[in-house]
Image (cartoon, rainbow, N blue to C red):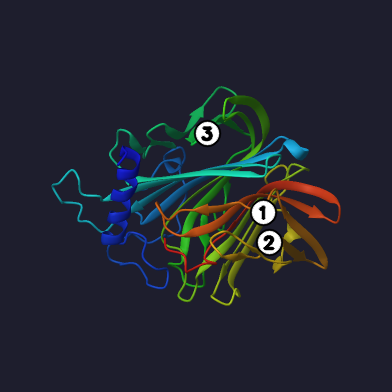
Amino acid sequence: MTPRRQLMKTAACWMAALSPWPSVLAAPDSDFYPRVRPRRLVFPTDHGAHPEYRTEWWYLTGWLGQGPSAMGFQLTFFRSRTQHAVDNPSRLAPQQLLFAHAALAVAQQDVFLHANRAGRLSGTHLRAATADTDLQFEDWRLRRVQRAAAEVYEGRFSGEGFSLSFEATTQQPALLRGQNGLSQKGPKAEQASYYYSRAPLRVSASVQLGKQTQWMQGQAWLDHEWSSQLLMSGAVGWDWLGINLLDGGTLMAFQIRNNKSESLFAHVDARDRDGKPAKGWRGLKWQPRGSWRSQSLIEYPIPMDLLVQGQSFRLVPLMLAQEVDARTSTGGFYWEGAVSLMQEDRILGHGYLELTGYGEPLRI
C-alpha cells in the first residue's frame, strides 16, 4: 500500500471512529465547542485558523480564460476539531484534522480533474496557522502575503496528471457577511458562522496538464468561514453561489434545504464594484431548470434559474460533470462547479455554484 493510500485509509478510520463530522440532524455538544457570538473581526488574526471551533474552511475558486478555452478551479482547506480531550498526552491524538479538496474543470476537453487529502494536523507538513492565512497539506498550500500595493493569496495544488499554481490579488477590503461578519444560517442564534469573502480577486495561474503548461489569467473568490453549528434540525444541505459580475460587483447567495428540496433559510448579499450593498437582488429565489444525473447516480438541479423582482437569470455550468467524490476525506459526493450567470443570451458574470446534501444528508 502506498503512503498516500495508507494516509487516506487512516483518515477514514479516524472519521468513522471519532465522528468529527456528525450528521447535521444532531446538534453538537454545546459544552465542548464555543458558540458564535457577535464580535468585531480583527485582521490579520481572523485570516488565520480558529482551532477552538468545530469546523472551518478556506474556499478559493477561480475562472480562468474565456470562451472555449475557459477553465474553472477550486482549492479548499477544511479544519475539523474532534472531541478528543485537549489534555490527552499522546502526540498522535487526532484533536485537529485537516482535509483538502482541489479540482480543475477544462471545458475544451470536457475533463474534470479532482483530488482529495485527509490527515491529522501536525504543524509541520500539515499546517493551519492561527496568526494569518497559512495552510499547508504537504505540497498543497494557501497563504496570504501582504505586499506593498495589495494583499496576495498564493496557492498550489496537484493531482494525477495536473497541477496549478496561482497568485490572487485583492482589489478591496474583506466583505463581511451578515451582521459585521456574523452570518445566520437559521432562526436560532447558535445557527451561525463567522464569515467573510475576498472578492473579486485578480488571479494569474500556471496550469499544467500532462506535459503541457500554460499561463492563464482571470478572476477568483475566497470565502473563509468558521463555526460550531451551521445547520438547523431538518436541514440536509445547502446551495451556495459566488459570482464575480462583469461590472465589478459581486453576488453571494445561499439557501439551506430540507429533504424535499424546500428552502428553510436563505440569504443574498450583492455588492457593487466599490463593495457597497446593492439592492437589486433582494428576494432572490432558486428554481431548478432541469436535472443532471452523475456517475454516483445522484440527481442535481442543474441548470438552475434565479428569480428576482420579476426577472429570470440562469446559472449555466461550464460543464455538467463537476461532481466531487469526497468519500476518502470529508465524506460523500457533492456538485461544485464553475458557472456563468446569464440573462437571456447575455453573460453577466462568472463564478462557482456548490450543491450539497442531494445524495444523503450533509455531514460536517
Q: Is residue 78 visible?
A: yes
Which label sits in the foreground, 2 or 1?
A: 1
Give SS at disc 3: loop
* Mark nearer the N terminus (3 vs 1): 3
Q: Amino acid at mark 3?
A: Gly
Q: Which residue bears the numbered disc 1?
A: 320
Residue 61 x %, y %: 59, 43
Crowding at mark 2 (Cα within 10 Å: few <14, some 14-19, many 20+): many
Q: Which residue bears the numbered disc 2?
A: 302
Give SS at disc 2: loop
Give SS at disc 1: loop
Q: Residue at x 18, y 43 (%)?
A: 91
Kindly check if marks 2 and 3 are in contact, taking CB atoms under 8 A apart as contact. no
Which label sits in the foreground, 2 or 3?
A: 3
For the C terminus, the image quarter is bottom left
Residue 304 x %, y %: 71, 62
Q: Residue at x 42, y 58 (%)?
A: 331
| Residue found at the far top of this picture | 148
Kindly check if marks 2 and 1 are in contact, taking CB atoms under 8 A apart as contact. yes
Q: Which residue bears the numbered disc 3?
A: 161
| Residue 262 versus residue 228 in the image, above or below | below
Q: Residue at x 47, y 50 (%)?
A: 40
Please state if 6 lies on the left or on the right of 231 as rendered.
left
* Mark nearer the N terminus (2 vs 3): 3
Please state if 180 lies on the left or on the right of 65 as rendered.
left
Crowding at mark 1 (Cα within 10 Å: few <14, some 14-19, many 20+): many
Residue 31 x %, y %: 28, 66
